[in-house]
Image (spheres, helix red, strand yellow):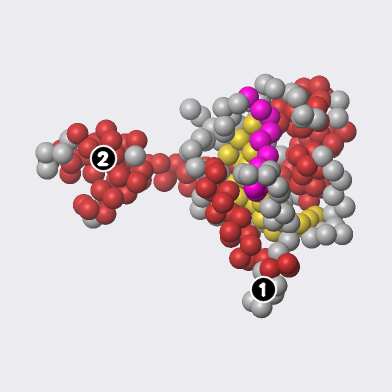
Amino acid sequence: MARKKFEELDLCDPFLFAAALEDEVICRLILEMILGRPIAKIRVHAEHTILYSSDFRSVRLDIYASDEVQVEYDIEMQNEDEHNLPKRSRYYQGEMDITSLKPGEDFKSLRPCFIIFICTFDPFGKGLYRYTFENKCLETELSLGDEVQKIFLNTKGIHTEGVSEELIYLLKYIENSTDTCAAEAKNAAIQKIHSRIKEMKKNRNLGVRYMQMEELLKKREQEGERRFGELALKLFETGREKEIIEAASNPKLRQALYREFGL
């Protein structure tokens, strides 16, 4: 399927999402709608976005809030269900904690953190727009108090209970970032986000970077097809043709076979 032009991208596209959340105003507005509270000011660390990374399947951002209490936010746009989000969130929390605590500092210095996945699929199959997880005692429901919250948002939600109308419109807008959708929201924050994104789409430098990314992706796809073709031939020649189909759908097996045959 042909990729959209840069001017036609929706906010769920990893490239536009990364570019948009580098804008501290957009980032703050989105976080406020997700968390349901005002944030005085944020500072975005953009070195981990796809604009500078080789991982184009998803986007990861380290975003830090600067207000009365320093809070860390990690936001990821996820368009493919790789069935690993719970453990990925665990890994991200560990990584954030390691980088935020200086040698010799007391554990009390660990800042509150929010790990947020915005998914264009339902990650837990319950039809909710929002799934929020905290560590609690199984016996008493007592909160552990580690100040860690993991939030999984679902643009395909159907149950509106306990979710603000503002957040529902934001999730709709993420998948359909058009003038019509922004106008239907009748929400000042979403309209402000949309206005800034429209200006962003006029940025020639961003458009060039998007085309460069597209070229890189195309080259990688072609290289991947060539490499898998060589693997399939090797498997066929060694009487292991049954493994060809399994390797096509199993990345771990495919990598192991590439190593085995020196490809």
User: As displayed, is residue 101 above or below residue 228?
Assistant: below
C-alpha span from label 2 to label 1: 48 Å
Taking the image as shown, residue 124 lies to the left or right of residue 65, namely left
Q: Residues within 10 Å of mark 2 (few under 14, many from 20)?
A: few
Residue 82 visible from this viewpoint? yes
Residue 39: x and y, percent?
85, 49
Residue beneath the point at 30% across and 44% down: 253
Task: Give residue 229's mark.
Answer: 2
Q: Nearer the viewer, residue 132 or 32?
A: 132
Q: Nearer the viewer, residue 218 or 130?
A: 130
Q: Nearer the viewer, residue 236 or 93?
A: 93
Point out the stretch of residues depicted in magenta: 127-137
Residue beneath the point at 78% across and 35% down: 194
Residue beneath the point at 87% across and 45% down: 38
**Amino acid type for the residue under numbered disc 2:** Gly
Taking the image as shown, residue 153 lies to the left or right of residue 233, namely right
User: In front of the other: label 2 or label 1?
Assistant: 1
Residue 69: x and y, percent?
83, 59
Dot 2 or dot 1, earlier in sequence: 1
User: As displayed, is residue 247 above or below residue 135?
Assistant: above
Asked if the residues shown at circle 2 and circle 1 are in contact, with their CB atoms under 8 angstroms apart, the answer is no
SS under mark 2: helix
Residue 139: x and y, percent?
63, 44
Residue 95: x and y, percent?
58, 60
Taking the image as shown, residue 249 lies to the left or right of residue 17, namely left
Residue 196 visible from this viewpoint? no
In this figure, which residue is indicated by the disc labeled 1? 102
In the rendered image, the residue lying farthest to the front is 139
Residue 45 picture quarter: bottom right
Q: How many marks?
A: 2
Tell whether position 107 is magenta: no
Tell whether position 128 is magenta: yes
